[in-house]
């Protein structure tokens, strides 16, 4: 497999993944930012998303937990400049994206989870003036390469 070095290449490989593999890779993207999460249910949901043998009922419960928390925290986004609260929201949104039930074939769960994870990191960086040496996009390229390799 060739190296993924930009979003165009990442999206190209994500397009060819089955729904289950999109979930698995999207969960890995969400897991990479789980340290910004404040809710135990979201942390458990990402672990469920990573399980190869998770039952449909477990996946649905995990989706509902992550989606519910993302919906609850959405109302706080934009009210103030609590960037870590907003990062927390986007982590939950990334987990929910990875766990989105099948139905809309135009939706790529892994890509949506990747974008939400990037938003979480961007919000967290607003609180931290140190910044990162490697951006979230580059980290995701490495995660995808390891997953596909």
Image: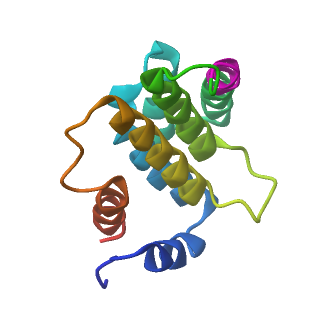
Question: Which residue lies at the image location 52% right of the left edge and 27% below the top edge?
Answer: 86
Q: Judge from the rendering whether residue 51 lies leftward or rightward of residue 20; answer left or right.
A: left
Q: What stretch is highlighted in magenta?
A: 68-76
Q: Vertically, is 77 above or below 20?
A: above
Q: Judge from the rendering whether residue 81 lies leftward or rightward of residue 5; answer left or right.
A: right
Q: Does the magenta stretch include residue 60?
A: no
Q: Nearer the viewer, residue 36 or 80?
A: 80
Q: Nearer the viewer, residue 130 or 138?
A: 130
Q: Is residue 116 visible?
A: yes
Question: Which residue lies at the image location 81% right of the left edge and 53% below the top edge?
Answer: 103
Q: Vertically, is 29 above or below 137?
A: above
Q: Does the magenta stretch include residue 71?
A: yes
Quadrant (top left/top right/bottom left/bottom right) for the C terminus: bottom left
Estimate the x, y position of residue 27 in percent, counting from the top left: 46, 44
Q: Judge from the rendering whether residue 42 lies leftward or rightward of residue 64; answer left or right.
A: left
Question: Which residue lies at the image location 56% right of the left edge and 59% below the top edge?
Answer: 111
Q: Nearer the viewer, residue 131 or 69?
A: 131
Quadrant assignment, res 124: top left
Estimate the x, y position of residue 55 in percent, counting from the top left: 60, 35
Question: Which residue lies at the image location 45% right of the left edge and 14% below the top edge?
Answer: 40
């Amino acid at each position: 497999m060739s190296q993924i070095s930009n979003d165009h290449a990442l999206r190209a490989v994500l397009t060819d993944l089955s729904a289950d593999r999109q979930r698995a890779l999207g969960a890995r993207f969400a897991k990479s930012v789980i340290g910004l999460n404040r809710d135990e249910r979201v942390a458990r949901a990402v672990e469920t998303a990573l399980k190869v043998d998770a039952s449909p009922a477990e996946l649905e419960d995990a989706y509902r937990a992550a989606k519910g928390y993302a919906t609850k925290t959405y109302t706080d986004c934009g009210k103030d400049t609590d960037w870590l609260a907003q990062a927390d929201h986007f982590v939950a949104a990334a987990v929910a994206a990875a766990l989105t039930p099948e139905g809309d074939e135009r939706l790529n769960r892994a890509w949506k989870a990747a974008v939400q994870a990037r938003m979480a990191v961007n919000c967290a960086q607003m609180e931290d003036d140190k910044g990162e040496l490697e951006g979230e996009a580059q980290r995701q390229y490495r995660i995808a390469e390891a997953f596909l390799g």
